[in-house]
Amino acid sequence: MTATQISVIVVSRHRPAALQRCLLGLTQQDHTDFEVIVVADPQAAAEVAALAKPIKLVAFDQANISAARNAGLAQAAGAVVAFIDDDAVAEPTWLSRLVAPFSDARVIASTGYVRGRNGISYQWKACEIGADAQDHALQIDALTLRAGTPQLAVKTQGTNCAFRADTLRAIGGFDPSFRFYLDEADVNLRMATLGLTAIVPEAQVHHGFEASARRAANRVPLSLFDIAASTALFLRRHQSAPDLAMGLRQLSHREAQRLSQHRRTGRLNARAETDLLLSMAKGWAAGCTEPLSPLAPLVQPKTGFLNFPSFGPSKGSVLCGRFWQKSALMNAAKHSAQSRVTTVICLSPTARPHQMRFQPEGFWLQTGGLFGRSTRDGPRLVFSSFQNRILQETARFAAFRPIN
């Protein structure tokens, strides 16, 4: 585990409950030398201030994640700056694993893996981003250092990434023209020739997809304006001869498929789909005409390092039981979570799929049926004794959090 001081930046806008849960997860990190910077709307910032924890607060209420991240970067005193979304919760080993590769002077960035809404299956693994704004999947299962070019670089996931702070400032930080979408990808291509990017599969966060001004809680988009604008802007910045017609066709095809899926499941009606396609057209037009402004290097912060209290290397507890024991398990977990990383596995005699969620009380809760599947691609029926199923489930997350 590295001794490098780390600044963790959390950007939040109008999601105070999710932000509080994210911060609670950070208190259980096994890394002991990091600070937390919260960039949030005034109401959420006030609620964080009421926690009376050593957190650097920046009041910011613009719908521009790049500008918000730069505001956090201006307060970051760590040699490495890490980012996690407010609707995500980090595994206790996340930060120490994510920043360990920076002990190699060649490493300028790192990224980890992201688990999705059920807390078990993966939402993101490893991929590269091309100058054409297309993702290219990578089959990587162990720590990998990878070089890039201005045309193809490792894509760091915005909810699970870190950068060498001086390098990020030297390229001008995040481009505020990317208000949402492709903001990290733009950084990745601009940094690509300056060093290596580490892919760290075991540095993991759980990402919940909370509702926002751009997306409903069921993942239906509320607007495609910023996605389209950022895509057009990205192509203009990174392709020597941008093929905007091809870019628009690729974007239209991808979004049409996504909207069609929402239509089939009844989450989207024809009128809403038309409005979304119209917002995409307007966003594309804006991205094709927005000026490509050069980015000046960002200045060094004037604030000192503010250590955030965390568990540090700690013990873990796994509490297991049947669904009729859930109340007792929850009460025991609330007490245990005060001093150690705690996981509850509560199973019913059914085939219900499993899910894992970090609770507002500070412990992890896995629920589902004794015979239900854990991962989305697993068998629908799992025949196992209670004891063996507990052992199987515990073995799956034991690589990421303490269990005994």
Image (cartoon, grey):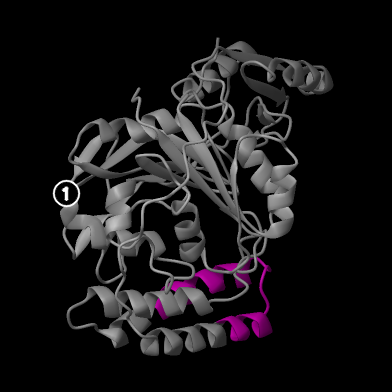
Residue visible at 19% across and 65% down in the picture: 151
Q: Position of residue 237 (x, y in %)?
A: 27, 76
Residue visible at 68% across and 36% down in the picture: 352
Quadrant location of the N terminus in the rendered image: top left
Which of 277 and 187 lies nearest the eye of the viewer?
Answer: 187
Which of 249 and 332 lies nearest the eye of the viewer?
Answer: 332
In the image, the segment drawn in magenta is 251-276
Specify whether residue 210 is in view: yes
Q: Is residue 23 above or below residue 313?
A: below
* Residue 35 on the magenta segment: no
Q: Position of residue 260 (x, y in %)?
A: 55, 73
Quadrant location of the C terminus in the rendered image: top right
Residue 254, quarter of the rendered image: bottom left
Q: Is residue 192 left or right of residue 64?
A: left
Residue 382, quarter of the rendered image: top right
Residue visible at 73% across and 25% down in the picture: 349
* Residue 265 on the magenta segment: yes
Specify whether residue 354 is in view: no
Residue identifier under label 1:
147
Q: Is residue 379 left or right of residue 152?
A: right
Which of 253 and 168 lies nearest the eye of the viewer?
Answer: 168
Which of 226 and 355 lies nearest the eye of the viewer?
Answer: 226
Q: Position of residue 183 (x, y in %)?
A: 40, 64
> Mark 1 belongs to which amino acid?
Ala
Q: Is residue 106 above or below residue 97?
A: below
Q: Position of residue 267 (x, y in %)?
A: 68, 68
Q: Is residue 149 above or below residue 256?
A: above
Residue visible at 55% across and 73% down in the picture: 259
| Crowd band around label 1 with a 10 angstrom C-alpha radius: few (<14), some (14–19), many (20+) | some
Q: Is residue 251 left or right of residue 259?
A: left
